[in-house]
């Protein structure tokens, strides 16, 4: 192989990527184990068997095309959890190269099988991001082998698309990104605020302008610097990581920010990582066939990069899109438009036989999304609450409830235990309610004075019915 094919100074970057992505896989399979069956299982809101009846394998490759059962889903999730734990614990560091590669590829194939049948509940950009990064990391090799530099460069190319794609979406989208006012609203209207979001929203507006400028630099300038010589590439990687940490502090975005921070490690000089990580043995053991495989994979991914690169330059840029069903090279982006007001769907139930203005309605509480105005926003990321996120999207289009919503109401009317476990509080612990409805509210963060006077984090205004009062048919 030519000089420079191996990068001994990047062995710490490999360590960070392998351990970190193993942890992200662990989270993803834990989420699947806890949430997939009530959302997508045999008796879920969008049952996978119905989806598979109309989906072709070549369009959505998945082991579940052989057959789907909730037992098989549990087995897939448990195998994923077990393999993820071996990676997090560093067990593959001493394994032969073929076994290391196989471990990562099995993780990738199992999670691809879940994502490709997950429909709207798995339509988030960080699913493809985990799969793309999870495929790449398979070819880094165990700790005793030389670090293949092309794979690290491919990680930088992935980071470039994540950041630059998001930056272009913003520039081409909402004018508030250009006049620097988007963050006057975003901390309040983002999908799932966290414990610090209220304080971020209440920062002076000049600081919001600085936040937007920092975002523009991280997404439109720093991505190009990733490919410059050191120490410029390290500066770019650190700046991107810093902005992602800021997002971690201010909101709940599943494992998106964590993976982006991990990707930034591919640009950091080994000496920089050496200041925060313990020293280790740098190996230069070369496995010739592994180098050949890395070269072949690099050529494949460069060829597959044509469509995503072309999309970056397109006027009608696609956001979070995959151009082939294996999700090997994708395009990313978020928040091309920012909502100015926050809407929430609140589900209420009653046991009254007749509905009157005096009817007592009791509210269901979700784990992460806003409900009770006095409840402090919670920190969930990097864990992912899929139902809570979809409830945010549902509130954006009140005239058209999503197709999973009526089945969700029916599950609550039947007191379905698996569905209720997705929620924080069931106001009808003894037996299901007789009637359910969904109400649309406008939410806003309280002011400093309102917080002191009432203790509430939110102030809300009822706008009307989102879903009419509904009972089970006889």
Image (cartoon, rainbow, N blue to C red):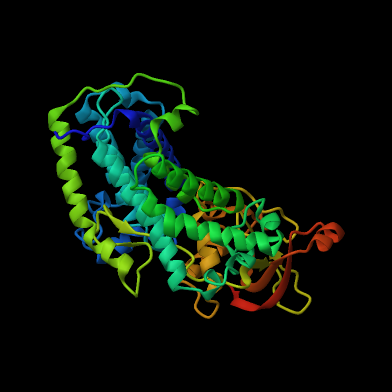
Q: Is residue 110 visible?
A: no
Q: Is residue 231 above or below residue 377?
A: above
Q: Residue at x 42, y 29 (%)?
A: 271
Residue positioned most to the top: 281
Estimate the x, y position of residue 461 in percent, counting from the top left.
Answer: 72, 74
Q: Is residue 319 visible?
A: yes
Q: Nearer the viewer, residue 423 or 411?
A: 423
Position of residue 111 measured from the top left corner of the image (x, y, whole percent) = 33, 47
Q: How many marks?
A: 0
Residue 43 vs residue 371, the one in the foreground: 371
Residue 356 lies in what quarter of the image? Answer: bottom right
| Left or right: residue 192 compared with residue 3 | right
Residue at left 24%, top 63%?
Answer: 307
Q: For this view, does 343 lie left or right of residue 456?
A: left
x and y percent of residue 99 in the render?
23, 29
Q: Determine which quarter of the picture holds residue 420.
A: bottom right
Residue found at x 35% / y 70%: 317
Q: Residue reaching furthest right?
A: 453
Q: Is residue 429 left or right of residue 313?
A: right
Q: Quadrant of the N terminus?
A: top left
């Amino acid at each position: 192989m030519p000089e420079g094919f191996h990068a001994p100074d990047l062995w710490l970057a490999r360590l960070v990527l392998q351990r970190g992505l193993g942890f992200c896989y662990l989270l993803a399979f834990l989420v699947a184990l806890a949430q997939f069956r009530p959302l997508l299982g045999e008796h879920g809101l969008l049952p996978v068997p119905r989806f598979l009846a109309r989906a072709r394998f070549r369009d959505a490759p998945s082991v579940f095309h052989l057959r789907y059962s909730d037992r098989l889903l549990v087995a897939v999730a448990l195998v994923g959890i077990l393999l993820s734990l071996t990676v997090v614990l560093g067990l593959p560091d001493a394994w032969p190269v073929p076994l290391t590669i196989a471990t990562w590829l099995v993780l990738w194939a199992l999670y691809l099988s879940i994502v490709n049948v997950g429909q709207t509940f798995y339509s988030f950009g960080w699913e493809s991001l985990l799969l793309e990064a999870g495929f790449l990391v398979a070819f880094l090799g165990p700790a005793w082998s030389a670090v293949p530099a092309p794979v690290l460069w491919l990680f930088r190319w992935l980071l470039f698309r994540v950041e630059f794609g998001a930056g272009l979406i913003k520039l081409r989208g909402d004018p508030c990104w250009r006049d620097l006012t988007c963050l006057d609203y975003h901390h309040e209207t983002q999908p799932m605020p966290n414990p610090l979001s209220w304080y971020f929203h209440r920062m002076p507006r000049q600081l919001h302008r600085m936040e937007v400028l920092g975002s523009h630099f991280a997404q439109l300038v720093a991505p190009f610097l990733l490919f410059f010589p050191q120490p410029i590439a390290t500066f770019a990687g650190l700046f991107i990581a810093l902005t992602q940490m800021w997002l971690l502090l201010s909101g709940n975005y599943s494992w998106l920010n964590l993976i982006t921070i991990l990707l930034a490690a591919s640009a950091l000089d080994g000496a920089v990582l050496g200041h925060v990580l313990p020293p280790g043995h740098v190996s230069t053991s070369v496995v010739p066939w592994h180098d050949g495989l890395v070269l072949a994979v690099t050529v494949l991914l460069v060829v597959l990069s044509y469509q995503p690169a072309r999309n970056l330059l397109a006027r009608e840029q696609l956001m979070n899109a995959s151009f082939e069903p294996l999700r090997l090279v994708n395009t990313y982006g978020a928040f091309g438009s920012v909502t100015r007001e926050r809407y929430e769907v609140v589900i209420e139930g009653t046991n009254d036989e007749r509905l009157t203005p005096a009817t007592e309605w009791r509210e269901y509480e979700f784990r992460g999304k806003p409900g009770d105005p006095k409840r402090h926003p919670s920190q969930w990321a990097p864990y992912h609450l899929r139902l809570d996120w979809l409830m945010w999207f549902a509130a954006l289009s009140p005239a058209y409830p999503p197709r999973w919503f009526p089945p969700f109401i029916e599950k609550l009317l039947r007191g379905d235990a698996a569905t209720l476990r997705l929620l924080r509080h069931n106001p009808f612990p003894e037996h299901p309610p007789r009637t359910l409805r969904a109400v649309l509210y406008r939410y806003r963060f309280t002011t400093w004075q309102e917080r002191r006077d009432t203790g509430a984090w939110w102030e809300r205004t009822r706008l009307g019915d989102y879903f009419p009062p509904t009972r089970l048919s006889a």
